[in-house]
Every structure is written in C-alpha cells, then in structure tokens.
Amino acid sequence: MLPLPASGGFIWNLGAVVGYGSLVFAVTLYLYPLRGEGIAHRRLFTISQHRRIGWIALYLAGLHAAILLIAQPLTGHYLLPSAPLYMLCGLAALIALAVLVATGIAARSVLRQPAAARVRSPSIATHAVLAGLLLGLLGAHVVGSGQLLDRPIKTITCCVLLALALLGAVWPRSKRIRARLFTTVIPSGITLATLLLLPTPIGGLRLLQTETTPAVLHAYFPHENHRTVNCIACHHNYVDKTGFGSCYDCHRSARTDLPQVAEATFHEFCRDCHSGLAREHGKHGPVRECSGCHVESAAVSALSNNTPICQTWRDAKSCSRGLQAADAWGFR
C-alpha cells in the first residue's frame, strides 16, 4: 500500500483505517476456515472463534460507515439508489456480513448434525453463497473508492490477494464439487471473474457509474487555484468542437457517444488529476473527502474571479467563455 496517498484529514483517515481493518478480519475467515471433520490442526478455527471474528468484521464495517457519515455528512448521498456502483457494492458487503453472522449463529446446531442434513440446511447454503460473493463485493468497494489503491500496481496486488484467499478456502473442498456447485463453486467463480476485471480500465470506470441520475450537488471550483492548468484541459469542447455551452449540456444528455454518466466522468477526471499532483509535487486539490469539493447549495460569495486566469493564458475572450460555461455547469 506504500507510498500512502494524500491525507483526507484525521477523522476521514481513521474511518478508512477502520474499514480496511474490517477487510482484514473478513479475509482472515478465508485464510483460516473452520475445522473439518477429522482434521486436527491448531491453525483452523473452531465455530466460536469463526463467529467471533465475523462479529469483529461486522462491527468494524459498521463503525467505518458511521465515522465517514459523521465526518462528512455529504457521504449520505452515497446511501441513495443513485450512488455509484462501488458504493452499492460496499452497502451490499455490509448487508452480506450481517447475514453471514446471522446464518453462522443459526448454523451452529446444524453443524452438529449428519453431513446429509447440512447439505439441506437453508442457513448453511445461504452462508456458503454469501461467503463466495463477499470478497468480490469488498474488492469492488475498495478499488472503486480509490482511498489507498491509487495506483494500478496496488489494485492488481489487492485483487490477487483476495483471489488467493478465496481459492485457499474453496480448493480443499473441490472433491465435493457437484454437491457444492450452486452454493460455493458458482458464487466463487463470479467473485474470481470480478476480481480479474477490477484492475482493467473498463472495470475501474464501471465502478464509478450510477444506475440512476443523481441530483446535482454543487461543487466549489476556485479557478484562481488552477492557473497552471490549461483551460482546454477541462473545456475541451472549445477546441475539438464536440459541443457548446455547459458541461451538463453534453455529459447529462442522451448522447450515445458519451456512455459514462457525468458523475463518473468528473470524479475520475478531478480525482486522478489531484492524485497525480499529490504524488509528483505534494501540492494538490482534494482527493478523498467529499466536502473538499462539494457543498450542499450554491454560494454566490464563493464565485471565483476568472479574469486573472484568462489573462494568464493570453486569450481573455475565448477563455472567459469557457470559464463561464463551467459556472453554468454547476461549479460554485
């Protein structure tokens, strides 16, 4: 995970650390599974130990969400159906953890029954299916959030480790593949395919997509802090003639040549630019916390003075049109 990315503030960093702690405990359950019949090995967990670690992972996951919501109330927008896919995967992972703990408690008595009764148990089947899917959901959430995995090599390493943990838990049971086809093999196969796609450009962009169009959340964009950035780096349409007017005129339109939603496009564009500056120069814009860019409502007093920037690029007339378009897009 080194070098570490730019800080998001103490509380935000604390929430991220707690979240990764939950991930570590969840992965531990795959590295050290339950003791099998006739297998005496001190490294394998008993039922009570397995359940206890599951509770710790669940508590940490809930605490992770609570800390971020308290530190950054704007994170609450990610609890809506319009949240990006990686956030929905995180919510699904939290629910899956809760169900895994619940079914694990119900399965205690079932595990003391003959093997034939275990196969027919709904709690055992549910537990196995969710266990097969959990690491895929966690991997999608971690990769999409980009908190620590800010470089391709980190993303690949994380996905490989998660895949190895899952294979380590599933492989010893491969002799009973037919009996576990729907409860273990297929869910685990879906997870492995997901972990394989996450490091690819297509997989990373898909995680930022939203299924429904969210409401506009205004962003504070101080143009005076972007004097070293060429205007057309953002306002490309004034050069390539792909559109006119505000960013939303195109990026929130029905144009088929723009498959990404505006939220995915600009989150990736701004975050990646700031992250690159953080690695190369140290001075950068917001990379993690929501309130570093977004505000609940437009504030007229926060409008930037665009004239000095236009003079910097020696094209006041064309540049001012581009900057005004940015304000019309929703930057405040």
Image (tube, helix red, strand yellow):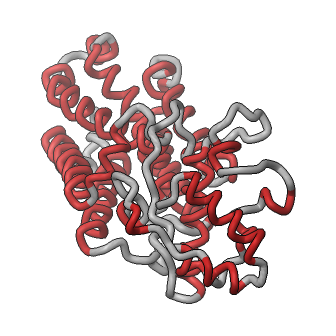
* Of residues 219 and 56, the one drawn nearer to the viewer in this rendering: 219
Q: Residue at x 61, y 39 (%)?
A: 193
| Residue 124 vertical placement versus 263 (above, below) | above
* Of residues 27 and 83, the one drawn nearer to the viewer in this rendering: 83
- Tell me residue 49's x, y (percent): 16, 46
| Residue 305 vertical placement versus 106 (above, below) | below
Quadrant for residue 131, please give it. Answer: top left
Q: Residue at x 46, y 59 (%)?
A: 219
* Residue 110 visible: yes
Q: Is residue 75 left or right of residue 181?
A: left
Total numbered badges shown on the rendered structure: 0
Quadrant for residue 318, please give it. Answer: bottom right
User: Of all residues shown, which one is farthest toward the bottom?
Assistant: 281
* Of residues 17 and 320, the one drawn nearer to the viewer in this rendering: 320
* Residue 196 visible: no
Q: Residue at x 31, y 10 (%)?
A: 120
Q: Is residue 217 left or right of residue 95?
A: right
Q: Is residue 201 left or right of residue 116?
A: right
- Tell me residue 37's x, y (percent): 28, 32
- Tell me residue 21's x, y (percent): 28, 60
Q: Residue at x 30, y 57 (%)?
A: 19
- Tell me residue 39's x, y (percent): 29, 41
